[in-house]
Amino acid sequence: MTFHGVSVGALSALLCVFCMCSSSTSRPPDLGDCEAGCDPVTGSGSSTPPQGGGLDSGTGAPIGDASICGLADMHVQTSDALCAPCIVQNCCSQDTSCTDTCTSLLDCTQGCASGDTLCLGACENMWTAGLTAYQAFIQCVQASCTNTCPMLMQ
């Protein structure tokens, strides 16, 4: 079959080539040189590392205010951006103690359904070395950060 002297097959192939060549893929802007630090919002390089969390690009170690106390605050699962700073400000020693011994227990218990004492018990039995630090961390968070952090199981 032809249309104005051109076969339908040739017209179909030409249409496919035109559609593929005219399509464009939307991509986010390039981040640029992030070796010296990088602003994740603008992508601009900076000689000053970001403050208040994140990892040092050279060592992989945590940087910012959270590293002064510990890392347990970064393990609390919440969408409230004020939770970790509240923990750092009010529960620094418990945060530090938990970082060394109980972050695995904290991660495990947050995977349990609310009120699931069997799951909580299994986590506690698996991570017994961190139980005392975990309980101190939870008690401080619940006493000091109830408006910004979720209720953690104990």
Image (tube, rainbow, N blue to C red):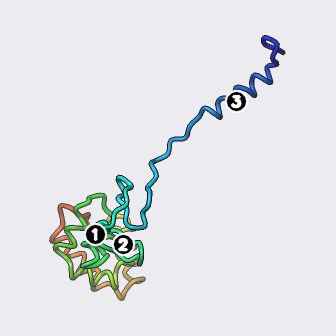
Q: Nearer the viewer, mark 1 or mark 3?
A: 3
Q: Is residue 52 above or below residue 95?
A: above
- Residue 150: percent from the left, percent from the top? 26, 63
- State the residue at coordinates (40%, 73%): 108
The circle on residue 16 is 3
Left or right: 124, with 20 as reference point: left
The image quadrant of residue 152 is bottom left
- Residue 73: percent from the left, percent from the top? 28, 72
Q: Residues within 10 Å of mark 2 (few under 14, many from 20)?
A: many
Work out whether residue 3 or residue 73 is closer to the camera in this orientation and state it. 3
Work out whether residue 122 or residue 67 is closer to the camera in this orientation and state it. 67
Q: Nearer the viewer, mark 3 or mark 2?
A: 3
Amino acid at circle 1: Leu
Looking at the image, which residue sits at the far bottom? 129
Amino acid at circle 2: Thr
Q: Helix, strand, or loop for circle 1?
A: loop
Work out whether residue 59 or residue 96 is closer to the camera in this orientation and state it. 59
Task: Determine the CA span between mark 2 and mark 1.
Answer: 8 Å
Work out whether residue 21 or residue 100 is closer to the camera in this orientation and state it. 21
- Residue 76: percent from the left, percent from the top? 31, 68
Task: Determine the CA span between mark 1 and mark 3.
Answer: 56 Å
Residue labelled with disc 2: 109
Left or right: 135, with 127 as reference point: left
The image quadrant of residue 50 is bottom left
- State the residue at coordinates (64%, 34%): 21
- State the residue at coordinates (75%, 28%): 13
Q: In terms of sequence position, does the residue under pointer 2 or pointer 1 come before the other?
A: 2
Task: Determine the CA span between mark 3 and mark 2.
Answer: 54 Å
Q: Quadrant of the N terminus?
A: top right
Amino acid at circle 3: Cys
Residue labelled with disc 1: 152
